[in-house]
Amino acid sequence: MKALSQKRRHPLAAIALLLMGLLLTGGLYAVATTVNEAKASTAEFTASDTQEGQKLFEANCATCHGMGASGTQDGPSLVGVGAAAVDFQVGTGRMPMQMNGPQAYKKPAQFNDTQTHQLAAYVASLGAGPAIPADEYLDEKGNAAEGGELFRVNCAMCHNAAAAGGALTRGKFAPALADVTGKHIYEAMATGPQNMPVFNDSNISPEGKRDIITFLKQIEANGSPGGADLGALGPVSEGLFVWIAGLGVIIAFTIWLTSRTS
Amino acid sequence: MSAASTAEAPAYVANTKVGRFTDFVDERVGGSGILREFGRKVFPDHWSFMFGEVALYSFVILLMSGTFLTFFFDPSMAETHYAGSYTPLKNVEMSVAYSSSLDISFDVRGGLFMRQVHHWAALLFVASVAVHMLRVFFTGAFRKPREMNWVVGGVLLILAMAAGFTGYSLPDDLLSGNGLRIIDGVIKSIPVIGTYISFFLFGGEFPGTVIISRLYTLHILLVPALILLMIVVHLFMVVVHKHTQYPGPGRNDRNVVGYPLGPVYAAKAGGFFFIVFGVIALMAAFFTINPIWNYGPYDPSPVSAGTQPDWYIGWVDGALRLMPGVIGDFHFEYIIFGHVLTLNVLLPALVPAGLVFTVLFMYPWIERWITKDNREHHVLDRPRNAPTRTAIGMAGFTFYCVMWAAASSDLIATHFHVALNDVTYWLRALFFIGPVIAFVVTKRVALALQRKDREIALHGRETGRIVRLPHGEFIEVHAPLDEYKRYKLVGFESPAPLPAEPNEHGVVTRKENRRAKLSRWFFEDRVAPATPAELEASHGHHEAVEAGEGQKTLSH
């Protein structure tokens, strides 16, 4: 202790102190930011998965994301995005991207499940990130009512209260959520793809995510009790329908009623 | 029927029970006289005359389905936990109003059907009122003596929108709550008194606990009563004025050509009610409308994407969407003596709607002043025969439609894969340019159609048969029109501009000069109908050629 107090006036003491402080805050920050990361992981990756994944990555993704996924001008670094991000982007066909644009479109997946798994393994090996969710959160047996409340507060402003999707600025959009698998919904919440914000575990708990998935699947299964849903787009499609179909049919009748046999 | 005459004439005794019963009633209320009078009222026949009827029938259907809904709806904003059969909302905290709307949808037998009948009928009601007004405008049916009935019609349109909006807000779901929030914002943007009005209306800060029950009172009591009153006034005036008719042989401003109300029209109108009811019932049975269970209970924090009002409020919503927040460095928000003046909200919410309704109400008097036309008109104009009026109407219609489209800018963006910003920029440009383009194009189209009419009246209809004459010339054979069809093409007025006239003091006032200028603008482009002399001349011209062509008329 004496040695320490003697050296406290050493010219390098201030630098050493600064370094220690930075290390401490940096370390705390790293812990704090990852502790809430959605990591309901079960997916075990083997070394061969990672190796195969690296080959696939270099052949298909490195053009934009760079060797070692360190990012280029055309694509962001993927270090630390986690397996969930890869599983979502590649699994829904958004990656590899068809063309540059405001937003990647969903399309038929280019890689099969094994290949997607291998790619995820490789990207996950580069740095810790959200993992592919465990099946217990995808069983669609949560509380739909609570999921609905969470959905309306957190998701409806972009995805529409009936999950029919909505427009964002400059060509970006929030897609409709019918036909999206529970796993992909979970991963989207955990990783925040495209323009979506990240909903980590402290924001919406894994159980909450399970409830949201349950809600979405339940309203999808419920269908439309009132008849054809006209795209679930609300008053716009209803207005269009009444003007074109409703008034159209009535005009046809008025013409019939006032026509004369001649 | 005086007492003396009944005493003298042998008392009429009907042969059948029914006859005796009707005779008993008739002797006391005089129904046969009313029937004789009304039964002989003549209505002209045209499909475009039936939109008012559609509106009336939709209103009757609204009254009936609405009454059913009041049996089960509870407009209370007290908090409750949903215990009905729709599981995605089980135990969710909500207002009693929303809970009872859900019960109507899922737990009352036939409730969802009746809700959908009511809502579809509401959309159709306002739509048919709007189309009816367009018909009246474009055919010039608002001219003397019907100016006041045009105003009553305009009031009915506003009342219909009010009825629709108050009803839209009742279920207290997320969508309607978002709509109310916008109304609250618009009210609060009114300088000085806005916040006071808002607090008065909502009983405190939005959303409060009273607004649903207040809107309910307006929706089921005041607004329908006013609509009913206005309908009575409207129909009374229709009876007084008699119905207008399209121009045709034998039709003039002193007669009405058509069928009597009884029995033909009574049967047609009665049947038509059931047709309208049937169409609405089919829509309600097969197409969902306002699925409130999708939207969840209202709470001021969430706002759903794609939040739109019903179609008839859409144009006001669209105007709000079109308004830019800032233009360059120019802001629209000022703080004056501690009061915030938010023109971003105030201007788009009130100015376009104010403009449309002011012009709409004033138009009969504007046109009357410009044209100095003080005669009664019972024969309608074909829209092409009043090119400037038709163009003004289309300009207004376009102005409305641009705002209307703007209300669905987000859906246009997502469904046509274009950027929302671009949709907004285009619509902003069209907001100003669109009416001008519409005016010019419509006027040119109307004039072109008039020229075509004139051409056909003078030279007959093209048959598509090309004939080569002995000397090598090719001509197309034109078939002459029969007299009835020709009447339609030549039987209209085409007023010339009315120059400024001095008043009784021999002075041409500045106002009169302005009027003359407007009159020139109104009438300077005109296609005169073919005159009998011209018709005669064109026939004379053809007669020489006709000699070799039998019945056909030829023309170059």
Image (cartoon, rainbow, N blue to C red):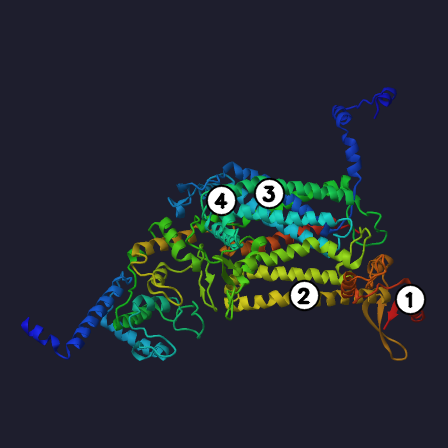
Task: Determine which residue is flagged by label 1.
Answer: B539
Q: Secondary structure at mark 3?
A: helix
Q: Secondary structure at mark 4?
A: helix
- Chain bearing tag 4 is B
- Marks 1/4 same chain: yes
Q: Nearer the viewer, mark 2 or mark 1?
A: 2
Q: Nearer the viewer, mark 4 or mark 2?
A: 4
Looking at the picture, tell me which residue is in the foreground, A151 or B230.
Answer: B230
Determine contact: label 2, label 1, CB under 8 Å. no
Q: Nearer the viewer, mark 1 or mark 3?
A: 3
Q: Nearer the viewer, mark 2 or mark 3?
A: 3
Determine contact: label 4, label 2, CB under 8 Å. no
Badge 3, how many Cα within 10 Å: few under 14, some, many 20+?
some
Amino acid, disc 2: Ala
Q: Secondary structure at mark 1?
A: helix
- Residue placed at 65% from the left, 60% from the top? B397
Left or right of residue B420, residue A248 in this image: right
Badge 4, how many Cα within 10 Å: few under 14, some, many 20+?
many
Amino acid, disc 3: Val
Q: Quadrant of the N terminus of chain A?
A: bottom left
Badge 1, how many Cα within 10 Å: few under 14, some, many 20+?
some
Quote the CA–CA distance across marks 1 and 4. Answer: 73 Å
Task: Determine which residue is flagged by label 3.
Answer: B223
Quote the CA–CA distance across marks 2 and 3. Answer: 35 Å
Could you tell me if residue B318 is visible in this image? no
Label at residue B438: 2
- Marks 4/2 same chain: yes
Quote the CA–CA distance across marks 4 and 2. Answer: 41 Å
Which quarter of the figure has residue A23? bottom left
